[in-house]
Image: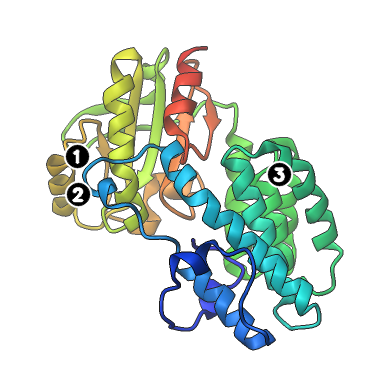
Amino acid sequence: MLLTAAGARAQSTNAPTQTELLSHALQAKDADGAWAELLNVNRHPPPAPAQWRDTLPDTAEKQKFYLPYVEALGDKAKDFYTRFPKDSHAGEAKLMEFQLLWLRIQWGQTTLRVNAEAAAKSLLNDPTVKGEDHFKVLWTLALNSPPEKARPLFQEIANGAAPEEMKSAAAAEVKKLDAMGKPVDLQFTAVDGRSVDLARLKGKVVLIDFWATWCPPCVREEPEVKQVYDQLHAKGFEIVGISLDKDKSQLTQFVAQHKMEWPQFFDGLYWQNKYARQFGIESIPAMWLIDKKGLLRVVDARGNLSGAVEKLLAE
């Protein structure tokens, strides 16, 4: 569970037991021990069930499996800052709990939204949540807000004293939000020679998939992307791949091996990829959805790709 609050400082320790993972309280009595315990649990989510190696779970199954762990981890974070409010890590623990709260909302516990918004206001006024963590609160809030509220939050990060990498990413998010509801100009010759022009795909729902074979999260997403394509292609769903690969042969071999039938853009420029730069893509995988009118409607289709596509197909 890669949370941004604290994972980078985790020490190498043994993976916790199932009981420790699902416990809602920390066992350590001192602050240093409790912090190390919290980070260790954060770094070691429950191992995936063996049957998932043979049958890919859908999003709902994955969420149901990991939800008890997420709930327990959030309570452990609260346990830490409640017991050790003056510890230097108290602010990070509060941020961790806050991020997990939004994750639970994304996974269907929508009644928690009021709590999360109240927590955001509290954190932004909390002197223990300072520096980069302050901007992480703004970032999490922006990601979970409608475009009209998200844009000024991202703009505040981009114009503020956040780390340069975060400022750059926030500026890219502003760029993407400015593109929402507008046509996307995308024309190229794919690696297999096909001519691609989004303007000719009006009447279809189109996924623009920014990815690369060297990106582990992208590779993990690929089976679900292909599954959605196989299920909904006949109903009017298309995919256009934008590959940030540097090696053309590696891309073509992967596409052939995994029977990815949709066209792929490749220019070998890695993060300087023409369309990644044009559209402000700072991280991958990134999944954009274009509606039947040719307008950009979704800039983060991960997690519920099938549902998002079906909703647009029904319009």
Q: Under tag 1, what secondary structure?
A: loop
What residue is pinned by disc 3?
Answer: 151
Q: Nearer the viewer, mark 1 or mark 2?
A: 2
| Residue 133 at least partly seen | no
Q: Is residue 310 above or below residue 214?
A: above
Residue at 82% over, 61% down: 124
Residue at 53% over, 72% down: 7
Which numbered disc covers residue 251?
A: 2
Quarter residue 56 falls in: top left
| Residue 116 at least partly seen | yes
Q: Earlier in the sequence, mark 1 or mark 3?
A: 3
Residue at 49% over, 66% down: 19
Which residue type carries mark 3?
Arg
Position in image of residue 77 (x %, y %): 66, 67
Tag 1–tag 2 contact (CB < 8 Å): yes
Q: Under tag 3, what secondary structure?
A: helix
Q: CA distance from mark 3 to mark 2?
A: 35 Å
Q: Earlier in the sequence, mark 3 or mark 2?
A: 3
